Image (spheres, rainbow, N blue to C red):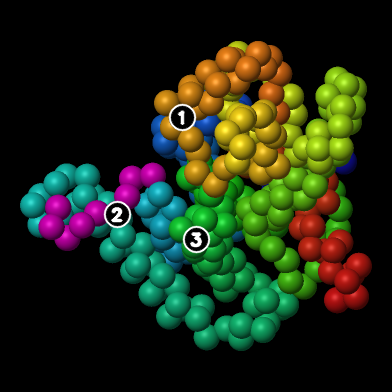
């Protein structure tokens, strides 16, 4: 069987996705932080492959600069936006970035003048072809980055590392045509989510497995000894009190004061809305130690990147999850 250049680039993209996202997920799990240098490093192979893909399709200057505009927008999450004051002051980096923005905007305008008269319905339905379809496909990356950026700003995607990861995926895999999909549902569907948003959706669906995993784990470890602990067993787990300080968890067990002046150990059913300070946590642990408590209930701080990494499998095998969900809803 012949292997096409598109398939080689597609599987290379998936390999880079596994390595780059897997490494980021591990750092987020261990440190709850992913340095910007990680994305600066891994965007390089993403840009290289995207450039090769555009060369293979015979892209013109406006398409290259439209892709540049997508990258420029995503870069604001890493390097920020240059100010006119800094540009006029002669700051070298800001001047270079400012020129980059101007050239990218020029590409957008040039592309709109050459390909903007296409029927939008035909573009969505895939009836356009050639460079017109390629420019609109490249331009759609801007919309994907915009959606991710707004989701970050409105805290629908809470972590900065999560948003940067999704923007990186949007650059690495700009559309479904760049992936060697095993399932044909996505390729045959008229309307689909962009790959980055499909990855987010698959990652979100894995959250539904958390309650079952925690419940089974608590059963195996004999952590459920009362009805109140049964309520906790779906979203929390037990931990030795001495490990709480060095773990990424919210402490649910605390000592509360009763109206009659006495106190008792109580397990909260929800994590606190505001993460306690180190001093507040230390005081809570000291109170529990004074009461002789050795094991406490905790809620784990689960980073989204940890769930995005295994979501690579259904994205590569099945594509867009909406192509399976929508028919189930009769749409």
Residue with the mark numbered 1: 280
Element at badge 2? loop
Q: How many marks?
A: 3
Q: What percent of the width, then of the height, locates residue 84?
A: 17, 60
Query: Taking 217 as reference, is 197 above or below it?
Result: below
- Left of 235 or right of it: where is 173? left
Residue with the mark numbered 3: 154
Q: What percent of the width, then of the height, locates residue 308?
A: 67, 42
Question: Residue placed farthest to the front in the image?
Answer: 260
Range of the magenta residues?
A: 78-86
- Answer yes or no: is residue 77 visible: yes
Element at badge 1? helix
Which residue occupies 77% across, 58% down? 320
Element at badge 3? loop
Q: CA distance from mark 2 to mark 3?
A: 19 Å
Image quadrant occupied by the N terminus? top right
Residue with the mark numbered 2: 81
Badge 3 crowding class, 10 Å Cα cut-off, few under 14, some 14 to 19, many 20 or more, is few
Which residue occupies 49% across, 61% down? 154
| Closer to the eye: label 2 or 1 | 1
Query: Taking 293 as reference, is 185 above or below it?
Result: below
Q: CA distance from mark 1 to mark 3?
A: 28 Å
Query: Taking 182 as reference, is 281 above or below it?
Result: above
Q: Nearer the viewer, residue 178 or 294?
A: 294
**Mark 2 or 3 closer to N-term?**
2
Badge 1 crowding class, 10 Å Cα cut-off, few under 14, some 14 to 19, many 20 or more, is few
Q: CA distance from mark 2 to mark 1?
A: 37 Å
**Mark 2 or 1 closer to N-term?**
2
């Amino acid at each position: 069987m012949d292997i096409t250049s598109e398939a080689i680039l597609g599987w290379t993209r998936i390999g880079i996705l596994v390595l780059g996202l897997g490494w980021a997920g591990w750092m987020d799990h261990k440190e709850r932080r992913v340095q910007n240098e990680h994305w600066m490093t891994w965007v390089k192979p993403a840009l290289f492959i995207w450039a090769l893909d555009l060369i293979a399709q015979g892209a013109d200057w406006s398409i290259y600069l439209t892709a540049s505009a997508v990258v420029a927008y995503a870069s604001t999450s890493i390097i920020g936006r240059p100010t006119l004051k800094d540009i006029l002051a002669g700051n070298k980096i800001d001047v270079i970035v400012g020129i980059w923005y101007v050239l990218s905007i020029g590409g957008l305008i040039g592309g709109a003048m050459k390909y903007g008269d296409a029927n939008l319905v035909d573009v969505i339905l895939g009836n356009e072809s050639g460079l017109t379809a390629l420019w609109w496909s490249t331009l759609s990356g801007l919309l994907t980055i915009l959606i991710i950026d707004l989701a970050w700003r409105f805290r629908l995607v809470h972590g900065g590392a999560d948003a940067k990861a999704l923007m990186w995926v949007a650059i690495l895999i700009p559309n479904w045509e760049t992936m060697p999909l095993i399932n044909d549902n996505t390729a045959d569907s008229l309307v689909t989510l962009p790959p980055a948003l499909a990855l987010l959706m698959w990652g979100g669906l894995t959250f539904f497995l958390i309650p079952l995993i925690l419940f089974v784990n608590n059963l195996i470890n004999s952590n459920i000894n009362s009805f109140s602990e049964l309520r906790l067993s779906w979203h929390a787990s037990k931990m030795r009190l001495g490990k709480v300080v060095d773990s990424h968890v919210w402490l649910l067990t605390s000592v509360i004061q009763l109206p009659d002046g006495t106190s008792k150990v109580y397990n909260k059913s929800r994590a606190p809305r505001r993460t306690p300070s180190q001093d507040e946590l230390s005081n809570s642990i000291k109170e529990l130690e004074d009461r002789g408590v050795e094991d406490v209930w905790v809620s784990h701080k689960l980073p989204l990147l940890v769930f995005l990494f295994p979501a690579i499998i259904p994205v590569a095998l099945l594509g867009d999850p909406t192509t399976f969900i929508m028919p189930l809803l009769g749409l």
